[in-house]
C-alpha cells in the first residue's frame, strides 16, 4: 500500500513547493508597492537624503524587483530573513520564538473542533426527521454566524470577568518562568517535570482554544451529517441491515468510515482558515504567538517581519494540507488507482 | 391567496427572517443621521462609561450608555452599520464579479485555462484569509475603498471554487450542446444558457459572502487597519471596549451583538435562498 501511495504523496509535495515559491513572490511583490521606505525607517530622523540613498543602495532597494526578490529568496533558503526594523533583532529568531505557541494553540483548537464536530454531526444525524430537527438546524446557522473572535470576547466576559474562573492574558501566570526547550509549552513543562507550569499553561489555553474550536465545529457537524445521509442511501448499508447487524454497528463500522472522508478533506481547508483565525484570538488574549508578532509588525510597518510571518503561515498551511491529502489517499482506497 | 401570489423564495420563513434583519440594518445605515440621537463622535468627558438606561445609573439621554470618551454607544452602533453594510454589499459584489467570471471561463472552456485558474486558486488558498487581508491592507493603506478592495482580492476564490464545479456540470448538459449546435457563440452560450442555470447558487454565495465581509471588516477595524478612527465601525468599538473591559463590559456586548445579528441575517437569507432556489433539492430537504 505504501508503494502505491508514495509517488502520489511525492507529487503532492512537489506541487506544494511550487505553490510556496509562487506565494513567496506574491508576498514580496505586494509588500514592495508599499508607500513606506524601509531605508528611511531604519535610519535616525537626523539622516540626510544622501544617507537614505546610500542605505537604499546598501539594502539593495535600488535594484529591479525580480533581482531584489532573488536576493531575498537566496537568503531565505538559508533561514536568513534579515533583521527587524523595529525590534532590531533577527527576524528568524522572532518567528522561531512565536511559531510554536501558535501551532500549539491551533492544533489544540482543531482537536476541539473535530471532537465537537463529530459529536454534533452524529447528534444531528441521529435526530434527522424528528421534531427537534428544525430547532437544531436553526441552532447550527446561529453557531455558524459567530466567528471565533466573538466567542473569544464572549468567553472573556463570562469566564474571565464575570466568573473570574479562568485567566485570559498571556501563556502563563506572571510568577512562573517560561521553561527552556522547544517552545511548545505543554510539552516543555512535562519534559521538565513542572506540573504547575503545565497546569497554568493549560488553563491559559482553555478559553482561546474553545473560542476557535467552537467557531469551527459547525462546519464539520453539517458536512458529517450530510455525508452520513448520503452514505445511508448506499446499497451496502441496506445489505448490512439485511444481514441483521445492529444499527450501532452499521453506523460505526460501515457508515462512519465512509462518511468521515469528506469531513477529513474539509479539515485541510478549514485548518488553513483556523490557523489564520488564531491571529485575532491571540491579539484578544495577548497570547505571544505569530499573530501578535504580525499585528505589531503591521503597526510598525516592519517589512522583514511581515514577509517572514506571512510566509510562516503559508508554510504551516501547506504542510498541513499535504499531510491531510496524503492521509486521505491512505484512507481512501478508491483514489489510489488514479 | 396572498401567499400563492408570492414567489416560492419569499414564502420561506428563513428568507423572511434573514431579509428582515438585513433590511433593518440597511435602513439604520441609510438613515443613520435621522435615527441616531447624538453625533457619533461627540464626546462628553463628564459622563464616560455610563451604563445602559435600564441598569442603575443609566441616563435616558444615552439609551445604551457611553464609552470611554463619553460618546453615545447607540449612535456609534447606528453609524457603524454604514461601514459594515457598504463593505458587505460592495465587497461581495466585487468578489462575485471576479470569482464568477473566472469560474465561468474555467468551467466552460476547461483545459489549460482551467488549469491556470485552478493553480491561482490553490496559491490564494494557501494564505489564511485573515493573514492575506492584513498583508493587503498593509500594501494598500487604510480607508473604506481599500478594505473593500482587499476583501475582493481575498474572497474571489470562494466564488471561483464553488461555482467552477457547478459550471462544469451544467456545461455538459444537452441543452448547452444544443445551443452550440444552433450556432450560439461561446459568449451567448455562457450568458444565455449557463449563467441562468447557476444563478441560484450565485445568489446564495453572495448572501453568505456578505456575512463574511462584515466579519472581515470587523477584524480589520479591530486591529486598526480598516477605516480611519474618525469613522465609527463595530470592530473599532470592540477594540476600544476591550481595553476597558472591567469598567464597562456592556460596551463590549453591544457591538458583538450587532456583528452577530448582521452575520446571522445574511446566513439565514443565504441558507433560505439555497433551499428554495435549488431545483434539485427534494421537498423534504427544502423544509
Image (cartoon, helix red, strand yellow):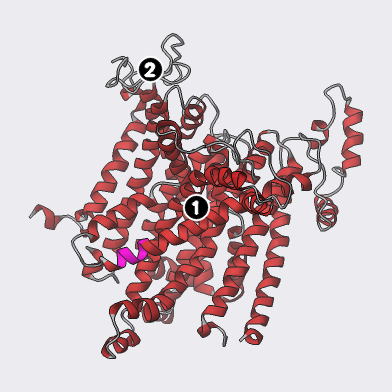
Q: Quadrant of the C terminus of chain A?
A: bottom right
Residue at 48%, 17% (x, y): give it: B69
Observer able to see residue B197: no
Q: Give the range drawn in magenta.
A: A120-125
The x, y position of residue A273, in whole percent, is: 54, 55
Could you tell me how far apart the alpha carbons at marks 2 and 1 are, in whole angstroms?
41 Å
The x, y position of residue A126, in whole percent, is: 28, 68
The x, y position of residue A199, in whole percent, is: 56, 46
Residue at 57%, 50% (x, y): give it: A105
Residue at 40%, 66% (x, y): give it: A223
Q: Mark 1 lies on which chain?
A: B
**Left or right, residue A319 beside residue A167:** right
| Residue beneath disc 1 | B95
The x, y position of residue A76, in whole percent, is: 81, 54
Q: Which chain carries label 2?
A: B
Residue B168 against residue B145 in the figure, above or below: below
- Nearest to the observer: residue B37 or residue A280: A280
At numbered mark 2, what does the secondary structure look like: helix, strand or loop? loop
Residue B236 lies within the magenta run? no
- Nearest to the observer: residue A201 or residue A153: A201
Residue A107 against residue B41 in the figure, above or below: below
Residue A173 against residue B190 in the figure, above or below: above
Task: Assess disc 2: are there few (<14), some (14-19) or many (≥20) residues with their C-alpha within 10 Å of its C-alpha.
Answer: many
Mark number, residue B50 = 2
Observer able to see residue A61: yes
- On whether disc 2 and disc 1 are found on a single subunit, the reply is yes
Q: In which quarter of the image is the N terminus of chain A?
A: bottom right
- Nearest to the observer: residue B252 or residue B227: B252
Q: Which of marks 2 and 1 is nearer the N terminus?
A: 2
Amino acid at each position: 500500500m505504501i508503494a502505491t501511495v508514495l509517488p502520489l504523496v511525492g507529487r503532492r509535495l512537489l506541487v506544494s513547493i511550487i505553490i510556496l515559491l509562487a506565494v513567496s513572490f506574491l508576498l514580496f511583490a505586494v509588500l514592495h508597492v508599499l508607500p513606506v521606505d524601509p531605508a528611511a525607517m531604519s535610519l535616525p530622523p537626523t539622516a540626510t537624503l544622501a544617507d537614505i540613498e546610500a542605505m537604499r543602495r546598501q539594502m539593495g532597494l535600488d535594484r529591479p524587483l525580480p533581482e531584489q526578490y532573488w536576493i531575498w529568496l537566496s537568503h531565505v533558503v538559508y533561514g536568513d530573513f534579515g533583521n527587524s526594523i523595529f525590534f532590531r533583532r533577527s527576524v528568524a529568531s522572532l518567528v522561531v520564538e512565536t511559531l510554536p505557541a501558535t501551532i500549539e494553540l491551533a492544533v489544540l483548537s482543531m482537536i476541539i473542533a473535530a471532537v465537537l464536530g463529530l459529536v454534533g454531526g452524529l447528534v444531528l444525524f441521529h435526530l434527522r426527521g424528528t421534531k427537534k430537527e428544525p430547532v437544531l438546524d436553526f441552532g447550527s446557522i446561529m453557531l455558524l454566524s459567530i466567528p471565533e473572535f466573538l466567542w473569544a470576547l464572549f468567553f472573556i466576559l463570562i469566564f474571565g470577568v464575570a466568573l473570574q474562573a479562568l485567566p485570559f492574558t498571556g501563556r502563563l501566570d506572571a510568577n512562573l518562568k517560561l521553561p527552556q526547550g522547544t517552545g511548545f509549552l505543554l510539552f516543555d513543562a512535562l519534559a521538565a517535570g513542572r506540573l504547575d507550569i503545565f497546569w497554568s499553561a493549560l488553563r491559559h489555553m482553555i478559553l482561546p482554544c474553545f473560542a476557535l474550536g467552537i467557531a469551527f465545529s459547525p462546519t464539520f457537524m453539517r458536512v458529517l451529517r450530510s455525508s452520513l445521509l448520503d452514505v445511508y442511501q448506499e446499497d451496502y448499508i441496506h445489505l448490512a441491515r439485511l444481514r441483521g447487524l445492529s444499527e450501532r454497528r452499521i453506523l460505526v463500522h460501515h457508515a462512519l468510515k465512509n462518511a468521515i472522508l469528506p469531513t477529513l478533506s474539509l479539515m485541510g481547508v478549514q485548518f488553513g482558515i483556523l490557523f489564520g483565525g488564531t491571529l485575532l484570538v491571540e491579539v484578544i488574549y495577548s497570547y505571544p504567538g505569530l499573530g501578535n508578532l504580525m499585528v505589531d509588525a503591521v503597526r510598525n510597518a516592519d517589512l522583514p517581519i511581515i514577509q517572514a510571518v506571512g510566509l510562516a503561515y503559508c508554510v504551516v498551511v501547506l504542510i498541513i494540507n499535504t499531510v491531510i491529502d496524503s492521509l486521505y489517499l491512505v484512507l481512501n482506497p478508491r483514489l489510489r488507482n488514479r | 391567496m396572498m401567499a400563492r401570489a408570492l414567489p416560492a423564495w419569499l414564502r420561506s420563513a428563513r428568507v423572511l427572517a434573514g431579509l428582515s434583519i438585513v433590511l433593518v440594518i440597511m435602513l439604520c445605515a441609510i438613515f443613520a443621521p435621522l435615527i441616531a440621537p447624538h453625533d457619533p463622535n461627540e464626546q462628553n468627558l463628564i459622563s464616560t462609561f455610563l451604563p445602559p438606561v435600564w441598569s442603575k445609573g443609566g441616563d435616558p439621554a444615552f439609551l445604551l450608555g457611553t464609552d470611554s470618551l463619553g460618546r453615545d454607544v447607540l449612535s456609534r452602533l447606528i453609524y457603524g452599520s454604514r461601514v459594515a453594510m457598504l463593505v458587505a454589499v460592495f465587497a461581495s459584489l466585487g468578489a462575485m464579479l471576479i470569482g464568477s467570471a473566472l469560474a465561468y471561463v474555467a468551467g466552460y472552456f476547461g483545459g489549460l485555462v482551467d488549469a491556470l485558474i485552478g493553480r491561482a486558486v490553490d496559491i490564494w488558498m494557501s494564505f489564511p484569509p485573515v493573514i492575506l487581508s492584513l498583508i493587503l491592507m498593509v500594501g494598500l493603506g487604510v480607508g473604506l475603498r481599500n478594505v473593500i478592495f482587499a476583501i475582493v482580492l481575498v474572497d474571489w476564490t470562494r466564488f471561483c471554487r464553488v461555482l467552477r464545479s457547478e459550471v462544469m456540470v451544467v456545461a455538459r448538459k444537452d441543452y448547452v450542446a444544443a445551443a452550440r449546435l444552433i450556432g450560439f457563440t461561446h459568449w451567448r452560450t455562457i450568458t444565455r444558457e449557463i449563467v441562468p442555470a447557476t444563478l441560484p447558487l450565485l445568489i446564495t454565495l453572495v448572501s453568505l459572502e456578505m456575512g463574511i465581509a462584515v466579519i472581515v471588516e470587523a477584524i480589520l477595524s479591530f486591529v486598526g487597519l480598516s477605516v480611519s478612527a474618525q469613522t465609527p465601525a463595530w470592530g473599532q468599538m470592540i477594540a476600544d471596549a476591550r481595553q476597558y473591559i472591567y469598567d464597562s463590559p456592556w460596551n463590549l456586548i453591544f457591538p458583538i451583538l450587532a456583528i452577530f445579528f448582521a452575520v446571522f441575517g445574511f446566513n439565514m437569507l443565504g441558507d433560505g435562498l439555497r433551499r428554495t432556489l435549488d431545483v434539485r433539492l427534494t421537498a423534504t430537504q427544502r423544509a
